[in-house]
Image (cartoon, rainbow, N blue to C red):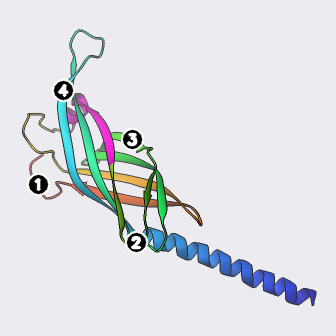
């Protein structure tokens, strides 16, 4: 009898663990990120030195779509912004957002402040009224659900098809 109870407990535990793994995979496979737009403002920053420096404030507007079967709350997104293979900025979005299951969507903004020097080192022209060169955003969204915490990695590309940097 004791062996039967142990067997039933093991079967129940393995079923729960398999279910958690399936939930994690469902979330990773059915939650997506998409860049809707990127806004750039170029300006001068007072650094306390003799001359101010040029800097670019970048706001990356991202649409998140939840096609999974589970409501989720995006708690944070950690991300890095790359021009070519060089990281030019990083950040964390920390405003929690709840996204409903089966087609729910929300928009979040990822902010990056990039120094003019970093942009110039990458050969990026900082003239006004020009579009940004190709950039890549690599990150990880941290979500909570009724079934625990999960991480959803992503890589987003902007202006990838432009040939001019």
Quarter of the figure with residue 23: bottom right
Residue 91's label in the rendered image is: 3
Q: Give neighbour class at mark 3: few <14, some 14-19, many 20+ (Cα, 10 Å).
A: some
| Residue picked out by circle 2 | 30
Which disc is residue 43 wearing?
4
Question: Mark 1 or mark 4, which has the lower sequence index?
Answer: 4
How far apart are the alpha carbons under marks 2 and 3? 24 Å
Q: CA distance from mark 3 to mark 1?
A: 25 Å
Q: What residue is disc 1 on?
A: 162
Proximity of marks 2 and 3: CB atoms separated by less than 8 Å? no
Rendered-image quadrant of the N terminus: bottom right
**Image point (43%, 72%), residue name:** 68
Q: What segment is highlighted magenta in the picture?
A: 109-122
Q: Is residue 109 left or right of residue 102?
A: left
Residue 164 position, x and y percent, is: 9, 49
Place of residue 54 in the rendered image (x, y in percent of width and height, measured from the top left):
20, 25
Disc 2/disc 4 C-alpha distance (Å): 39 Å
Quadrant of image for the C terminus: top left
For label 4, the SS is: strand
> Which one is earlier in the sequence, the residue at label 2 or at label 4?
2
* Identity of the residue drawn at 15% across and 39% down: 124
Label 1 – label 4 distance at C-alpha: 24 Å
| Front position among marks 1 and 2 | 2
Crowd around label 2: few <14 · some 14–19 · many ≥20 (10 Å): some
Q: Nearer the viewer, mark 3 or mark 1?
A: 3
- Contact flag, marks 2 and 4 (Cβ < 8 Å): no
């Amino acid at each position: 009898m004791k062996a039967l109870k142990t067997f039933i407990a093991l079967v129940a535990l393995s079923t729960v663990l398999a279910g958690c793994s399936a939930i994690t995979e469902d979330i990773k496979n059915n939650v997506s990120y998409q860049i809707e737009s990127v806004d750039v403002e170029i300006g001068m920053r007072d650094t306390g030195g003799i001359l101010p420096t040029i800097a670019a404030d970048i706001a990356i507007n991202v649409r998140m779509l939840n096609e999974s079967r589970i409501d989720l709350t995006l708690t944070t997104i950690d991300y890095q912004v790359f021009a070519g293979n060089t990281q030019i900025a990083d950040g964390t979005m920390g405003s929690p957002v709840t996204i409903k299951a089966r087609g729910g969507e929300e928009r979040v903004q990822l902010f990056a402040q990039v120094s003019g020097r970093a942009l110039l080192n990458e050969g990026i022209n900082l003239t006004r009224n020009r579009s940004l060169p190709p950039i890549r955003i690599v990150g990880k969204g941290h979500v909570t659900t009724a079934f625990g915490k999960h991480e959803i990695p992503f890589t987003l590309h902007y202006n990838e098809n432009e040939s001019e940097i």
